[in-house]
Image (tube, rainbow, N blue to C red):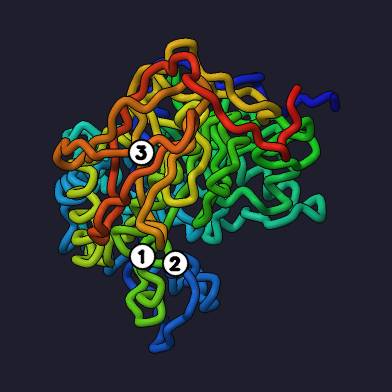
Amino acid sequence: MIPLRYGADGTGRREDPTMRAFRADRFGQFVHWGLYALPAGTWKGQTIEFAAEFLMQSAGVSREEWSALAADFTLDGFDPAAWARTAKRMGARYVTVTTKHHDGFCLWPTAHTDFSVAATPSGRDVLGEILDAYRAEGLATHLYYSVLDWHHPDWRCAVDSDSDREAFERYLRFATDQLLELAERYPQVRGFWFDGTWDASVKANGRWTHEIERLLKERIPGVIVNSRLRADDHGARHFDSNGALMGDYESGYERRLPAPWDLSVTAHDWEACATLTQASWGFHDSDWAERGRKTPAQIVEQLAQTVSLGGNLLLNFGPRGDGSLAPVEVALAEEVGAWMAVNGPAVHDSGPAAGWDYPGWGFYTAPLEHTAPFRNAAPQEPETPDEDPTGIVHAIVVRIPVSGLLTLALPAGVALRAVRARADGTELPFTPLDAHTVQLAAPAPTGMPTVLVLETGSAGPADGLSEPNPDVALV
C-alpha cells in the first residue's frame, strides 16, 4: 500500500440514510444552463460544431465579450416550476443543476465575483428559485460546480512558476469561499457534483480537493460528493493510487456505460451522466446538434442497463437562452415518464438481481432488499443466492431475438413460479427446458422496452434423470 495523506477516506460504501436514498432514486435530471444558452453554439454568424457550453473557448471569445452576454440574460421564458414538473413526470427523483460552468458565470448572487446573475437585468437568485421549485415537487437537489474557470484571472491550467503558484492559491481560496457560500446559502441540498478538475493544476492540489470535501461535509452533514472532485497526493483521480474510490460514488461514466455484463462496477456506488443530443450539454441550436438526438427508447434502455449494474442515470437537459425548455426535450420527458408510470418499480428502489446473468436480450433488476450483495471488491466467484430466493425479478426486454423466444437462465436454487406482463398483469406461459433454463415467447414489440415480472421461489430437489454432458467434467 502506498502511504497517502489525500487518498480515499473510507474502505466501503456509505450506508447512511442520505446515501441509501440517493442509491434508491436511480434516475435524476441534469440541468446545464448559463450564458452559453444565449448564443446556443453560434458566434458572430458562425456555428461551432462543438459543445455549446465550451463556446467561449472554442470560438476564442474574450472575457469582455462573453461578460457582455449577461445583459441579454433576461429570463423571459424562465419557469423553474415547469422544469420541476417535467422532471417529476419523467420519473426523476433528483436534480443536479449547474451553479457555475467553465465560463465562470454564477447562477446565484455570489459575494465573491461580479460575474453573476446579480449583474443581469433581473438580478434574481436564479439558482435559489430552481432549488425551491424542485423541492416543492419532492425532488432532492444537487449542485454542480466547475472548478475550472476561464473568467477568473487567477485560474491556471498548470502551475509552472512561482507566479502561477501564487495565482492559483488565490484562485483556490476564491473557489473555497464560493463553495462554502453555496453550502451556507442552500443548506437543503443533498449533494455536490464537481467538474473541471482534470487539469494539471488541480491534480497537483490533492490537499485542496480533500479539504474542501471535508469542509462541505462539516457544513452539511450527510452531503454527498462525487468522485470527480478528488485527486490524491500523486494526482490520481476518482480512484486513489491504491485503487480505492475517492468521494461517495464514481462519476467517471460520461455518455457511456459499463459493459452490461461487467458486475465489477457493483463494488461501489456509481452514476452515469448522459446527454439528449450526443454533441452538447448546453442548448445548441443547430442541425449539427440535432443529428445525435436520442429517442425515448434509447434513454429507457440506458436507464435499464444502469440500474441492472447498480448505478444511477443522470439525464441532461439544456434549457434555451430565455429559460424555457426546448419542446423536443419536454416531449421526450413525457414519453419516458409514460413508460416510468407503468414500469417505475423496475427502476426506482431497484438494483442488480442476484445470480441473474446478462441475457443478451435485456436486463434484470430486483428490489434493493433482494439485490445481489454489494461488493467491496471485484467479484471472483459467482454469487451464491440467498437461502430463500422467493421474490420478484424484473426482466426488461429491449431487443427481441429473431427466433421470437426469450431464454432465461435461472440462478442455482431458484425456480420460476410465474411470468406476468408489468403493463397489465397478464400471466404468460413458459416452458422449462431443464432444471436451470426456461423459455417463453417474446412480447410483441411496442417501440419501447417491455417489462416482465418474474415471480421466483426455491427450487426443490431435481426430479427424474438428466443426460450427462460429456464435455463437462464431473467431480
Which residue sits furthest bottom?
45
Of the two numbered discs 3 and 1 on the same chain, state the one appearing first in sequence: 1
User: Judging from the image, what secondary structure is the residue with disc 2 in?
Assistant: loop
Nearer to us of marks 1 and 2 is: 1
Q: Are marks 1 and 2 in contact (CB under 8 Å)?
A: yes
Q: Is residue 182 left or right of residue 150?
A: left
Which residue sits furthest top?
387
Q: Is residue 120 visible?
A: no
User: Judging from the image, what secondary structure is the residue with disc 1 in?
Assistant: loop
Residue at 56% of width from left, 38% of height from top?
A: 250
Is residue 345 depicted above or below 272 in this figure?
above
Residue at 54% of width from left, 71% of height from top?
A: 57
Image quadrant where one finds the N terminus:
top right
In the rendering, at what x and y percent does residue 13 appear? 56, 22
Based on the displayed image, in which of its 4 quarters is residue 290 positioned? bottom left
31 or 35, which lies in front? 31
Q: Which residue is mark 3?
A: 431
Is residue 6 depicted above or below 51 in this figure?
above
Q: Which residue is mark 2?
A: 278
Dot 2: few (<14), some (14–19), or many (≥20) neighbours within 10 Å?
some
Q: Are marks 2 and 3 in contact (CB under 8 Å)?
A: no
Residue at 21% of width from left, 31% of height from top?
A: 138
Image quadrant where one finds the C terminus:
top right
How far apart, in angstroms, are the residues tagged by discs 2 and 3?
A: 42 Å
Q: Which residue is mark 1?
A: 294
Amino acid of disc 1: Lys
Of the two numbered discs 1 and 2 on the same chain, state the one appearing first in sequence: 2
Dot 1: few (<14), some (14–19), or many (≥20) neighbours within 10 Å?
some
Amino acid of disc 3: Thr
Residue at 33% of width from left, 51% of height from top?
A: 300
Nearer to us of marks 3 and 1 is: 3
